[in-house]
Image: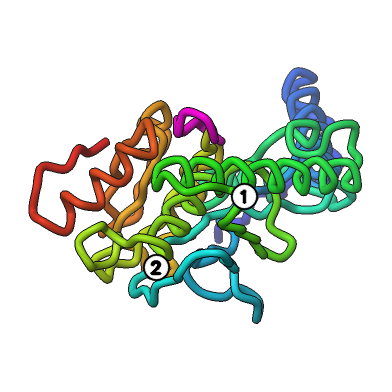
Amino acid sequence: MSVAPKLPSASKLSDALPSKYRAVALCGVAVAALFAVAALAPLPYTLTTPGVTADALASFEGNQVLTITGAPVRQTSGSLRVTTISATEPQTSISLQQAISGWLDPKVAVLPREAVYPQGNPAKANQENAQQMTQAQDSATTAALNYLHLSADQVKVTVDLGAIGGPSGGQMLSLAIIDKLSGNGRGGDLTGGRNIAGTGTIDGATGEIGPVGGVSLKTWGASRDGATVFLVPRGECSEAKVNTPPGLRLIPVTTLTDSLNVLTALDTGGSVPSC
């Protein structure tokens, strides 16, 4: 008759483990606990995502974006979309898990909170964004009227984009003003009926289009809202090409004249640059 060997008790097994193994086990528990705490602890980051887009040729939040007086205004087709990004509020807690998830998602950018909200003050950030938008509207109007050789003393343009702030709407607002007043100069629309989006500041005096940041998120917002063409400041082509949404054509531009030439080429089958 065989007899099963007697097993040592759990406490005896523990006592039998070499001390170095017990130390490793205890360290593993400590590390796991630290990771658990870190995963729940708030981090000084802000999550940014594709924001709303506003068709500058139409209305936004129930109000006409462009109101022009002092000159005949055309009926237009297609869209010229101002693009934006959205950000979590500074008081929003971002966990390690959320940050890692954001880093892995092409539609999310994880940024230091100070980069989005200077001094952690959302009121100050909103005030600065509103001021930048006012400046962008003025520059867009000046650039468009200069291109059309129209006087700001006779033609008045007001812009209503609701709570959208920042300087990045300048290029698209200029194009929309030109389209409303002159179209493509041949009796048609600048858009050729297309859904076109873009970003970029604009210099009222020179028409130069400048970089603004967040373009890799804005492309996703544009694609989500049906855009097939995205006008991007030339210096931001490399960023825009990161995880470009399928079906969205990226076109680099440097000046307002570049943008207008590109739209003409799209309509006539001419040569169009790409990022």
Magenta segment, principal secondary structure?
Answer: loop
Left or right for 188, reference 179: left
Q: Say which residue appears at 49% left-offset and 31% top-offset.
A: 210
Q: Secondary structure at mark 1?
A: loop
Magenta stretch in the rendered image: 204-212
Q: Say which residue appears at 75% left-offset and 38% top-offset.
A: 116
Quadrant into which the C terminus falls: top left
Q: Position of residue 157 (x, y in %)?
A: 60, 59
Residue lying at the far top in this picture: please name it: 20
Does label 2 or label 1 sit earlier along the sequence?
2
Residue 228 circle label: none
Task: Name which residue type carries label 1.
Answer: Asp
Q: Position of residue 197 (x, y in %)?
A: 41, 56
Question: How packed is label 1: few (under 14 Cα within 10 Å), some, or many (20 or more)?
Answer: few
Task: Name which residue type carries label 2.
Answer: Ser
Q: Nearer the viewer, residue 262 or 20?
A: 262
CA gap between label 2 and label 1 equals 28 Å
The residue pinned by badge 2 equals 79
Q: Say which residue appears at 34% left-offset and 75% top-offset.
A: 77
Q: Position of residue 111 (x, y in %)?
A: 68, 36
Q: Position of residue 48 (x, y in %)?
A: 64, 49
Q: Nearer the viewer, residue 71 or 118?
A: 71
Q: Is any atom of residue 111 visible in this view?
A: yes
The reply to whether the C-beta atoms of the residues labelled 2 and 1 are less than 8 Å apart is no
Total number of numbered labels? 2
Q: Is any atom of residue 13 visible in this view?
A: no
Question: Does the magenta-highlighted stretch encompass residue 214?
Answer: no
Left or right for 245, reference 95: left
Question: How packed is label 2: few (under 14 Cα within 10 Å), some, or many (20 or more)?
Answer: many
The residue pinned by badge 1 equals 153
Q: Say which residue appears at 28% left-offset and 66% top-offset.
A: 189
Q: Secondary structure at mark 2?
A: strand
